[in-house]
Amino acid sequence: MIAAAASGWTGLRAAFLMLAAAVLTACASSGWNIPAPETNPLEQALLQEGVSPARSALVIYRLEDEMVWASGGARIRERFTPASTSKIPHTLLALETGAVTGPAESFEWDGQTRFVDSWNEDQDFAAAFQRSTVWIYKIVVPRIGAERLTEGLKAFGYGNAEIGGPDLISRYWLEGPLAISATEQVEFLSRLARRTLPLSARTYELAVPVMVVDRGEGWTLYGKTGWKSVEGQMDIGWFVGWVEQTQGAAPGTYAFALNMDMPGGMEEAPKRRAAVERALRDIGALPDQGR
């Protein structure tokens, strides 16, 4: 059962509060809140992948020594609809509450053709996460129930933890009111990587392997992309997760979150992961061959 949030993340939150204070102070005094692009490796990575630092937020946090890298100024604390990045907490809650039996639970396709080809077939819950199959999560999330969803999201410290009324139960993470900032994503993911969220050992054992994006010798990358697209609003792209590296010049566990404006819609989607992976390589969190 989801309990009240644990207190083991005090140091992490303090680190981000200090970062935010420094950012906002610099912003108020100079109108710009981060080092010049030539001295900020995250900005350089974003620029090289065609992402505007002025229209994005990227935060990377190393768990072992609480080192923080950031780009985006006050935007690192601005909340946006999480879209499919919410599949991380929703997967945890679905497994914890028994809304799904496990990653192998199968879902029968309803025959409705959707715009992503890989959605248009029967698939299990693990595939639904990896393919970001929205129609399956629209089935699973209501099974969890409004009370447990709200309780769980609050215990996770997941943004505003707002799911709206009954009519929004299958879309609140796509359109709102659920919203979360880059720093809040990193705080949540750091607790997930440390396994200090209020979850059973079984949930971690079943959920974490599903979240693997890529791996190589001495490193594993976990994560989830997201694309918030609501008519009349700016499209927002996300890539969030964490990397565990046991080798290289800077071994450690790094939690990260990127959100970015996507005026070009899905044509800009490849930039999300590319920009984050370049930034991780540039600070030593991924080896050069980890692309």
Image (cartoon, grey):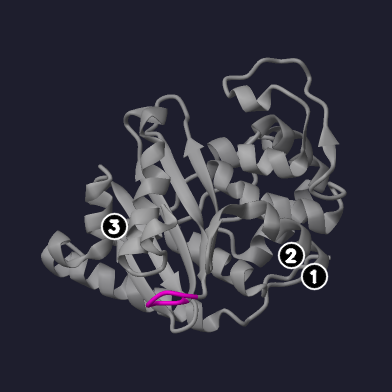
Which is the main secondary structure of the residues drawn in magenta? Answer: loop
Is 119 placed left or right of 32 in the picture? right
Residue 256 seen by the camera: yes
Q: Nearer the viewer, mark 1 or mark 3?
A: 1
Question: Residue 142: which numbered mark, if any?
Answer: none
Q: Residues within 10 Å of mark 1 (few under 14, many from 20)?
A: few
Instruction: Name the kind of residue labelled 1 in the image.
Output: Ala
Please report the bounds of the magenta region as a residue range.
247-251
Q: Position of residue 236 (x, y in %)?
A: 41, 39
Is 270 placed left or right of 63 in the picture? left
Label 1 sits on residue: 201
Q: CA distance from mark 1 to mark 3?
A: 36 Å
Relative vertical location of residue 273 with respect to residue 229 in this rendering, above or below: below
Callout 1: SS: helix
Label 3 sits on residue: 72
Q: Residues within 10 Å of mark 2 (few under 14, many from 20)?
A: some
Label 2 sits on residue: 204
Instruction: Name the kind of residue labelled 3 in the image.
Output: Gly
Callout 2: SS: helix
Residue located at (60% from left, 69% from top): 193
Relative vertical location of residue 134 with respect to residue 152 in this rendering, above or below: above
Q: Nearer the viewer, residue 134 or 153?
A: 134
Q: Residues within 10 Å of mark 3 (few under 14, many from 20)?
A: many
Whether pointer 1 and pointer 2 mark residues with C-beta atoms closer than 8 Å, the reply is: yes
